[in-house]
């Protein structure tokens, strides 16, 4: 029965393919495009469902960043820009709705059209689209932006460029992009490349421009002023071209967004308490309960808002650099995960209020299921079983401690794994290999909102590793030093955070793909090179149904999790924002993606009571 079903399916597919070569395309320009199915919002939608179209305009919001900056160009590898810029100062052809897994609606483009199998995508620019200097956004700007970012820009833009066969003008306002790979997501990803002004960079070195050369964008905000390393001030453009677009109604409500920079998170939080900052995000549930009771909170001048979401957990923790021995040995990584006493650490630092991440896609339908792999998931994984840990098929769960400070059972398991890998404790109590080399590790941390929590975790972890004869050195650096070392993979362990959407796709290759492992400044920090991972991502990208897509993500989740590349810590299932009472948001219409730059500051507003 099974073979007959597939025989008929192949015959039907062949017939459809033949028709596609003999019949003209039936694609029509539309107002939006979804990864699967149709966009949820109709062509005449008024605003995004989580925005207030009647939100008042005005006011100022001040936010804080830890560290400094030495660039105002967020599109190149060189320098460290304020992370907010690429979201607030530049636009893309299509804009995303964060109340759907992955759906785009027209922004710079008024319509989108795709081939029958999404082998190409065509965008038609809005005639009214303008850069902040008043000049029109043209087809030439779009083509130049794709070419330049794809060849000279940050690594996040290069993966898609390698999958573009050609990009060409098909009319005075239309651009067609033809792909060289079977990948349904590319039609959407292509709509999310930032568009820059070509003429600004004529005769200039885009990749090495100085801080004074601020890229001209088309978004609601422009950089009004800046003091290097201290602050950046963004001003809402009163002549912004797209203020009446449905995608923009109720967004970009603040007249001014000011980004202040602080040396560490403690100073930033004190600045907030003193009224110098409008809001902070708190990642520690224990601190949220115990430390946000200062007078401004109790008298109502500061409001505590909790924003739930439906996203996968993603992965937060401490990543192993497998480019370095002995971290290239899965037994050593497994031992180090066993030695991390999460239950005790979580209780001590967060009061046990935040559950642990159990896999990269946990807390969602995309995550691997407990027990053995079954059905389509098993089919996808079986061809790679010989090169993968057995638990990929049999099932895997993170080791659990008893909550005590000693964590004896897990440390015994860790010793056994290390011994199996050739590491023994010598007479001086130091763990060494057969050549007498001691096992010493360095963990790299940066100064941001999670630094204190991560540092406290590593202090406890270092004491546990001492009992195994391992020395762990904790190195906390400023943002610039951290970025430079991370870009060159100069660490043994590092703090790690990867958010994952409800529709993961091509970015997964940037996170886990072999090509990204050797790319300076890449996101594949663990340095993994796994044919199984790339095959699972390929299956995701070629899925024709939501069901096949979910099976592929669950299979990918199994490969990543059982590879023991990261020591997972706690989930952040709720966004916690403390803010001045004048900052408002649509409390009864939260997006399924919860908090993020798409939420605060994008759809918040300032309102005096």
Image (tube, rainbow, N blue to C red):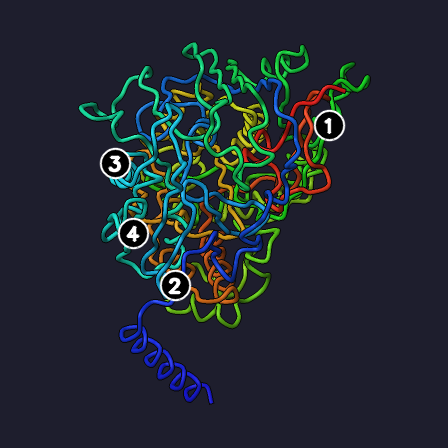
- In the visual, does 93 lie left or right of 256? left
| Residue matched to label 1 | 304
Name above or below for residue 241 compared with residue 157. Answer: above
For the residues labelled 4 and 3, the Cα–Cα distance comes to 15 Å
Mark toward the start of the polypeptide (4 vs 3): 3
* SS assignment at label 3: helix
In space, the residues marked 3 and 2 are separated at their CA atoms by 29 Å
Q: Earlier in the sequence, mark 4 or mark 2?
A: 2
- Vertical comparison of 175 with 11: above or below: above
Residue 358 appears in view: no
Q: Which residue is mark 2?
A: 27
Compared across the picture, whether 446 is left or right of 489 comes to right
Res. 485 image quadrant: top left
- Estimate the x, y position of residue 581 in percent, counting from the top left: 73, 22
Q: Position of residue 258 (x, y in %)?
A: 53, 17
Tags 4 and 2 touching, CB below 8 Å: no
Residue, disc 3: 148
Residue at x 48%, y 28% (from the top left corner): 220
Q: How many marks?
A: 4
Residue 177 disc label: 4
């Amino acid at each position: 029965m099974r073979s007959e079903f597939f025989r008929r399916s192949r015959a039907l597919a062949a017939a459809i393919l033949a028709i596609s070569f003999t019949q003209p395309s039936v694609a029509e320009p539309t107002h939006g495009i979804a990864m699967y199915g149709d966009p949820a919002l109709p062509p005449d939608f008024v605003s995004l469902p989580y925005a207030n179209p009647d939100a008042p305009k005005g006011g100022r919001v001040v936010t804080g960043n830890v560290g400094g900056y030495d660039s105002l160009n967020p599109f190149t590898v060189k320098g460290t820009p304020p992370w907010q810029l690429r979201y607030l100062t530049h636009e893309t052809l299509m804009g995303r709705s964060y109340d759907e897994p992955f759906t785009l609606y027209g922004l710079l483009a008024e319509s989108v059209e795709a081939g029958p199998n999404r082998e190409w995508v065509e965008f038609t620019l809005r005639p009214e689209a303008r850069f902040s200097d008043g000049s029109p956004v043209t087809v030439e700007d779009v083509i130049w932006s794709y070419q330049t970012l794809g060849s000279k820009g940050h690594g996040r833009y290069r993966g898609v460029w390698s999958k573009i066969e050609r990009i060409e003008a098909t009319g005075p306002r239309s651009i067609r992009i033809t792909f060289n790979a079977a990948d349904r997501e590319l039609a959407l990803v292509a709509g999310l490349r930032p568009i820059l002004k070509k003429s600004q960079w004529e005769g200039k070195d885009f990749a090495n421009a100085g801080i004074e050369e601020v890229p001209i964008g088309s978004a609601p905000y422009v950089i009004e002023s800046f003091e290097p390393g201290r602050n950046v001030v963004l001003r809402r453009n009163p002549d912004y071209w797209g203020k009446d677009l449905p995608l923009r109604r109720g967004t970009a409500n603040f007249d001014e967004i000011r980004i202040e920079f602080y040396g560490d998170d403690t100073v930033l939080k004190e600045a907030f308490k003193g009224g110098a900052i409008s809001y902070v995000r708190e990642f520690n549930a224990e601190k949220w309960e115990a430390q946000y009771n200062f007078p401004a909170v109790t008298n109502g001048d500061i409001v505590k808002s909790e924003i739930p979401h439906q996203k996968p957990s993603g992965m937060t923790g401490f990543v192993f650099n497998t480019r370095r021995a002995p971290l290239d040995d899965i037994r050593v990584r497994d031992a180090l995960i066993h030695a991390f006493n999460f239950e005790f650490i979580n209780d001590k630092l967060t009061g046990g209020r935040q559950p642990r991440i159990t896999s990269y896609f946990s807390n969602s339908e995309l995550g691997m299921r407990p027990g053995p792999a079954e059905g389509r998931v098993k089919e996808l994984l079986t061809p790679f079983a010989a090169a993968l840990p057995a638990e990929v098929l049999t099932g895997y769960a993170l080791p659990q401690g008893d909550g005590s400070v000693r964590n004896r059972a897990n440390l015994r398991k860790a010793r056994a794994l290390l011994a199996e890998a050739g590491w023994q404790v010598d007479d001086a109590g130091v763990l060494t290999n057969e050549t007498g080399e001691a096992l010493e590790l360095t963990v790299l941390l940066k100064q941001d909102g999670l630094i204190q929590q991560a540092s406290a975790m590593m202090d406890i972890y270092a004491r546990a590793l001492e009992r195994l004869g391992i020395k762990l050195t904790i190195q906390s650096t400023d943002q610039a030093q951290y970025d430079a070392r991370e870009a060159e993979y100069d660490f043994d362990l590092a703090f790690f955070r990867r958010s994952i959407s409800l529709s993961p796709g091509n970015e997964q290759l940037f996170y886990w793909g072999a090509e990204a492992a050797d790319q300076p400044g890449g996101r594949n920090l663990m340095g993994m090179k796994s044919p199984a991972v790339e095959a699972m991502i390929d299956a995701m990208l070629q899925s024709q149904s939501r069901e096949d897509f979910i099976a592929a993500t669950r299979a990918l989740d199994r490969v990543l999790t059982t590879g023991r590349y990261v020591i997972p810590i706690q989930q952040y299932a709720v966004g916690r924002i403390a803010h001045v009472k004048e900052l408002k948001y649509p409390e009864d219409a939260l997006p399924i993606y919860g908090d993020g730059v798409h939420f605060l500051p994008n759809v918040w507003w300032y309102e005096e009571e």
